[in-house]
Image (cartoon, rainbow, N blue to C red):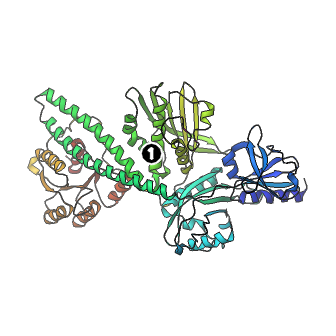
Amino acid sequence: MKRGQKGEIAAFIELVEFMGAPAVLVSLHDKTVIHANSRLLKKHGKLFQPGSRLDFKNFKTLNSHSLSGLELRKKQPIPQFAKSSLKNARLEFVKLNDSYALILEKTPAPEPLKLNEQSGLDKKSGRRLHFSYLYNFMTNKWAYCTENAIFEKLGKTLGADLKKDFDWKSVIHPDDRALYDNTIMNLRQHGGDHEIHYRIICSNGEILNVKDYCALTAPEAGKWPVLIGTVIYAEKSYSEMHQAEHQILQGRLVSGMVHDFKNLLGGIQNIVEWAASKSSGNPEVAHALNKTLSYTDKAAKLISSTLKLNSAKEDGKTERIYINSIISDMEEIIRRALPSSSTLKIKMKPGIPPVYGQRCMLQDMILNLCVNARDAMKEKGDCLKLELDQKNIRDENGKQQQFIRLRIADNGCGMSKSVQNSIFDAFYSTKDHGAGLGLWMVRETVKSFDGKINVLSTPGKGTCFEILFPVINQEVEGSIPEAENLVVEPVNKPGEMSKVLSFNKEKRRTILFIEDEPLIRGSVSIWLESLGFKILESGDGLEGLGIFQDKHKEIDLVIQDYVLPGKKGDELLEDLKKCDQNIPVIVSSANPDEDKIAMLKQKGAHAFLPKPFRMEELLRLLVAIFKI
């Protein structure tokens, strides 16, 4: 091959990589693939790898056409194309010269970019956000490939001139930059094709969802690898948005009712616990009350799991997530989803690092796979296993890459190879009910975490879904702090009272208890008074603050709810600390989350007590605070 030909091929390959559409470079002499870009390989896999042969059926005048339509008739044993009308064709044939041609795949038009007139995009034009880019890590220069008209309007929309090395990362939503940075870091370390879902902010403050398909060009001698990518608009349609809003509204209503029920359950639990402590003279009554406590513990755990699922769906933000914590939170819900004849086995290695993404998506993915496993075991099978560990796999450069591995396996009916090849397709289903989107959503979720999913299944023996999340070797700025040493762990043995059943009454301590639910306030106060504490009660945040300001010199501890009338829980905590920096404050809530706990720790809370709590948990805190 002549030197000039090598340079020509290299230029065509770079062109293919820079294109926003799936594309392949073909030799017209022997009808073989020279190069396919990452978007085409992502969609069609190994069919178009370099060296693969292509068959152009009934297209004898291939070399004489500069632009034609193509139709992919079949994929096996080799891809076979037939001529088609250019207007209706999904594929386009573009002759570059007598030796080489391009085959381009038309991408389905995304939803029109619906912006107001101030955003700089004309509604009537219906133009969409869809363009490709190059980013040079050595020079920090960005280059963009798209039509000038849409490019200029897009620049106005984003409040910048994209033609002059505009920094695309500058318009990414701040909450999504950690996810973006981690994916790019993973890509630089290990290569591969990646799909990132994130948001960008327009100049008028409007937020758009986009998908970014990116990869690295192969490094050449004396050159740095370059990041290439294609960005498309990924906003939902109006009907989808309306449906999502309707579901969120329903979730909020249900969440509010569950929250209130959890408070009532907590008050009942505290009263039963107090009665159990007073029934030592009647073993049968004590046994019955302790049994009742074990049932309330299970109910409380189930409610807590449900609330965490709902709160995550409402939030929908990108954050640092510990998968082992997610599985622990969902354990009771998964158990309840299984029939009583089935067994759930969970095995998690400690010290698993975090991943970045949306908590609700990860929860839905796990729940979806567990429900599918349950359905697969209706006629045969009785065991669902969840395993979490780490695994090393060689990347495309031969380097060892670390992954977090989640395996969800059942011993149910299993799947044939043909079913396995279709389960991730949208609207595919083997069930009489459902829309056939469950496993498609699972795959999309795995992509959003920059992960991989493998399926191992044997008919009659069961199925295992293996999800691999890449481990990033370096944390990015803006990562979410952990709320360490603040949450009180629940008691594992219901019915066992603390060894400390009474406190020194000679040195009587005073507790201010601020709680708006009368049942909880009354039951906990009875307990604490029976142990020798003096209790000041309030059902209102503002009233509680007034009591503390008047009597803070005689108050030794404050226990406050997070959701209160009169004054919000975090504001109340701040005001209590302003009045007396050294006062220990225990904050209680029926709807805890990591961000809230971290924020309370930062503002000076001594501990966070999830509702409903057992008195054993509160007593353990009091022993530590007062060093008894």
**547 left or right of 97?**
left
**474 left or right of 166?**
left
Residue lying at 60% horizontally and 53% vertically, measured from the top left: 195
> Is residue 140 or residue 447 the one in the foreground?
447
Magenta part of the protein: which range? 423-431
Q: Is residue 56 above or below residue 86?
A: above
Q: Which residue is mark 1?
A: 363
SS of the residue under disc 1:
helix
Magenta stretch contains residue 130: no
| Residue ranking furthest to the right | 2
Rendered location of residue 467, percent (x, y): 54, 41
Circle count: 1
**530 left or right of 363?**
left
Amino acid type at circle 1 is: Gln
Q: Is residue 402 above or below residue 128?
A: above
Number of residues whose C-alpha sits closer than 10 Å to that of mark 1, classed few (under 14), some (14–19) or many (20 or more): some
Rendered location of residue 307, percent (x, y): 34, 48
Could you tell me what secondary structure mostly forms the magenta stretch? loop
Residue lying at 58% horizontally and 33% vertically, measured from the top left: 456
> Is residue 196 or residue 439 the one in the foreground?
439
